Amino acid sequence: MATCAGRSRDSWGGPVAERVLTGRWVRVPNVVWRRFFDGVVVLGPVAERPIRVTAPGRVIWEQLAVPLEIDSLVEAVAHRVGMPAAQVHDDVVTVVRALVEVGAVAPA
Amino acid sequence: MGPEGQISTTVWDVARSLAVECSPSASNAAAHGPLSDAQFSELIWVCEQHRLLGALVAAVESRRVEATDGQRGSLEVRALVWLSHSLEVERVLLRLGEVFDRVGIEWRVLKGVALAHLVYADPAERVFADLDVLVPSDQFDEALRSARAELGGVQPVAELRPGFDREFGKDALIQVGTVEVDLHRTFVTGAFGLTIPLAELFADSTPVSIGGRTCAALGPSALLMHACFNAALGDRPVRLAALRDLLLVWARSPLTVDEVAAVAARWKAEAVVQHAARTVIEVLGLPPTHPLAPLTTIEVPRRQQWALRSYLTSRRSYTRPLASLLVIKGVRRRARYVRAIARPSTAYLQSRGWSEGGHLRRAFARLVGRTRG
């Protein structure tokens, strides 16, 4: 079980980290997932194991049902959790990167 | 003590209330108060055995079951294991569905996987351990071959005798990685599995979205009947999740009691429906006014009562085949059935680690009641 806590500060590098900040992102169609407390558990098509995304993971996952740019996603998440966008930005990017890595989210 | 002997009454009551309403009512929770760490650990264990762990998570999340931080942490660990496995099961379903569609095999997704998405408010509330898929008898062998070849599946137990599964069998088990796939031809072994008009199971379907893909589950009549079969003739002792499944399927079913009785009569399974409804009401302690109650009074032919007993005895491994002989039509078919039961193939015996002599001695001993079934 891989875990991506929304408030962790993993050191991400390389192409995925750069790409996430541009373009629009959406869930890929054949991903299986479940709500789990305040987060979600997601098994991407190419992942070896499910990934658990804690708060605000559920909000991010729900928003990514439709294609969104990162900035729009950050705004939506900030609105849902009642915090300033600047405060949730890094968490959102971290979660989206993790979801991209396991093939659960892809460019729209 | 609860019905399984070692389970405390308090824990069993909470588990039962989870099965009735997914999470205990406020009055139940208040009646029991907070559980001790030992009781909560026992509750987690019971919920794992009865496939109610997702319901317990929902109850803790909504604070209808009180849990300390430590208790919640223990629950998270176990629930995550089950949820993760459920997702792996669903991913295998998506792969298997692709294969079957490509080679032209009709299929229906069954049991926990289908019901989690069809009748539960949140699929996370229904965890499951394996994948159950129904295929037509005349495509059974091809389905097995495809699952083995395309998914790298392994069949740990060989067929009783060549051709037995597609003519009389209930299912075949294929191991795909960590996931057990039960490829079904019918719902149960024994007499009641042999009288189901199998073509009806593919006459209609209920669309169910899993992983963004629309799969086919059973149509309304077969869905309800299958829930009854699981509650009445499934695991012994019965799993609470099977009872909850039936409650939810019935609550969402468009069928009237008369329509259910008509389907049950056509399937020669009135005893199954009646026993399932009685089991739900007795085990979960539901009132006689419950909407399921009318199903407890449908008329059951005497022959079916005898067949039902063949499933409920501890010697059912051997009484079920005997009862099957009553419903198998034709001398040659009966002979093939008896031969397969009495003289399994060498491959089957080897896959079970048995010898031919040992198989016959075991069968005789169980039939005369020397050992427990």
Image: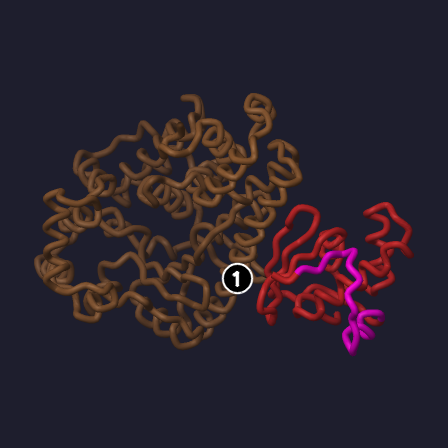
Chain colours: A red, B brown
Task: Name the residue rendered at 34%, 45% in the picture.
Answer: B235
The picture places residue B308, in percent across and down from the top left corner, at 23, 39
B102 and A91: which is toward the camera = A91
Using the image as rendered, state which of residue B151 and residue B118 is in the foreground: B151
**The quadrant where residue A60 appears:** bottom right
Task: Determine whether, in the image, residue A39 is placed left or right of residue A91.
Answer: left
Please state the horizontal and vertical placement of residue B69, each as a whole percent of the image: 66, 39
**On the rendered image, what quadrant is the N terminus of chain A found in?**
bottom right
Residue in the picture at 66% in, 57% down: A52
Q: Position of B347 compared to B76: left or right?
A: left
Q: Quadrant of the C terminus of chain A?
A: bottom right
- Above or below: residue B232 compared with residue B24: below
Identify the residue shown where x is 87% and y is 62%: A71
- Dot 1 lies on which element? helix
Chain letter of mark 1 equals B
Q: Position of residue B17 (x, y in %)?
A: 50, 31
- Examine the structure image and report whether residue B87 is included in the region drawn in magenta: no
Please state the total of marks drawn on the protein image.
Answer: 1
User: In this picture, is B56 found above or below B350?
Assistant: above
Left/right of residue A97 with respect to residue B146 in the rendered view: right
> Where does the magenta region start and end?
A3-21
Q: Is residue A12 magenta?
A: yes
Depicted B55 relative to depicted A79: above or below? above
Residue at horizontal 86 percent and vertical 45 percent from the top:
A82
Along the line of sight, which residue is nearer the eye, B350 or B195? B350
Callout 1: 10 Å neighbours few (<14), some, many (20+)? Answer: many
Asked whether B58 or B198 is in front, the reply is B58
The residue that label 1 is drawn on is B88
x, y (%) of residue B18? 52, 34
- Indicate the amino acid at tag 1: Glu
